[in-house]
Amino acid sequence: MKPKLLVIVGPTAVGKTRLSVWLAKRFHGEIISGDSMQVYRGMDIGTAKIMPGEMEEIPHHLIDIRDPDQLFSVQEYQKLAREKIAEITEREQLPMLVGGTGLYIESVVHDYAMPHVKENMELRKELKEMAQREGKEALHRKLEKVDPVQAHKLHPNDVRRIIRALEVYHVTGKPFSELKRKGTSPYDALWIGLTMPRELLYERINRRVDEMIASGLVDEVKQLWNKGYRLHLTSMQAIGYKEIMSYLEGDISFDEAVHLIKLGSRKYAKRQLSWFRRLSEIHWFDITNAESFQEIELLIAGKFHLARE
């Protein structure tokens, strides 16, 4: 029998954290973070990382496992997440994969065979220099010419992954998107997708950004700055961090930084929904519907034949 796996996805600020903790208490679950930026230590406020007091004694995994200047790949995430799923299953608990980074989550559940291509440091240096000289958009257009499928999935600001996709094409002669084969899933997975009316979601996003600022996001970024972390790092390209970093460097005003964080977060939510909407196995629930929690609970109990606490 395949191991059970509960997957909870949805856009930023929709309420995944609250629901996942509630379900974990009901079904003896342990939560594995499916967020590419919550792996970094010291990036708490801007990534909306769950705090110890909010966990309600539910184990959470793959949070705070790297420093912001350490590289972290989809391949590493896939390996670590699968190890955690096996450990949780061995403890006879329910593994719950929760987050909004679509590529990371799919790499685990859909059995992606990630390309293992040796790093070409000379090519990477050349492509980084091109991005600095001609702009990130020029690098993105270069990828578009050889791998339009992968280019569509990556934002022009995601320089590290764009360079990796170009590197794979340069070494193998094949598009990165064609080297990720999706086989049968190694899990008996149940996908839950959370949504809400767009206007309400955008209001929640804007309010969350205001709360992050009030909670000390600027000070958090200052601390990272004082440790030597700068915008060239993938971690510092996270929404909220790159804008405040630009403010600290004097490139934009504080008000402009806050505006850009809200705008970037809303655009990110839209991209997340587009990514997950293509997956037919997701059961979608409007989180503003008072009956949704009970319906989700019944679906999980029926699918996995689990008793509720």
Image (cartoon, rainbow, N blue to C red):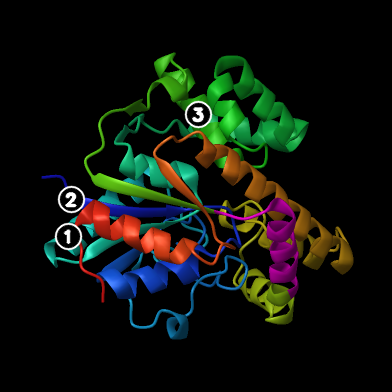
Is residue 222 at least partly visible in the picture?
yes
Residue at position x 26%, y 37% in the image: 185
Q: CA distance from mark 1 to mark 2?
A: 7 Å
Residue 75, by quadrant, is: top left
Viewport quadrant of the N terminus: top left
Residue 132 drawn above or below residue 209: above
Q: Which mark is residue 142?
A: none
Q: Secondary structure at mark 3?
A: helix
Residue at position x 14%, y 67% in the image: 91
Judge by depth and name the residue closer to the eye, 93 or 158.
Answer: 93
Residue under label 1: 89
From the top left corner, tell me how far across and down residue 124 is, in percent.
Answer: 54, 33
Q: Amino acid at mark 3?
A: Ala
Q: Secondary structure at mark 1?
A: helix
Magenta region includes residue 190:
no
From the top left corner, tell me how far across and down residue 92 is, in percent.
Answer: 14, 65
Q: CA distance from mark 3 to mark 1?
A: 34 Å
Q: Which dot, 3 or 1, sits closer to the camera?
A: 1
Magenta region, residue range:
195-210
First of labels 1, 2 by sequence position:
2
Residue under label 3: 165
From the top left corner, tell me how far across and down residue 205 is, in percent.
Answer: 70, 62
Drawn side of residue 160 relative to residue 226, left or right: left
Q: Which mark is residue 3?
A: 2
Residue at position x 58%, y 45% in the image: 272
Marks 3,1: beta carbons within 8 A? no
Q: Amino acid at mark 2?
A: Pro
Drawn side of residue 252 relative to residue 285, left or right: right
Marks 1,2: beta carbons within 8 A? yes
Residue 196, by quadrant, is: bottom right
Instruction: Answer few, some or many: residues within 10 Å of disc 1's Cα (few below 14, many 20 plus, some between 14 and 19).
Output: some
Q: Secondary structure at mark 2?
A: loop
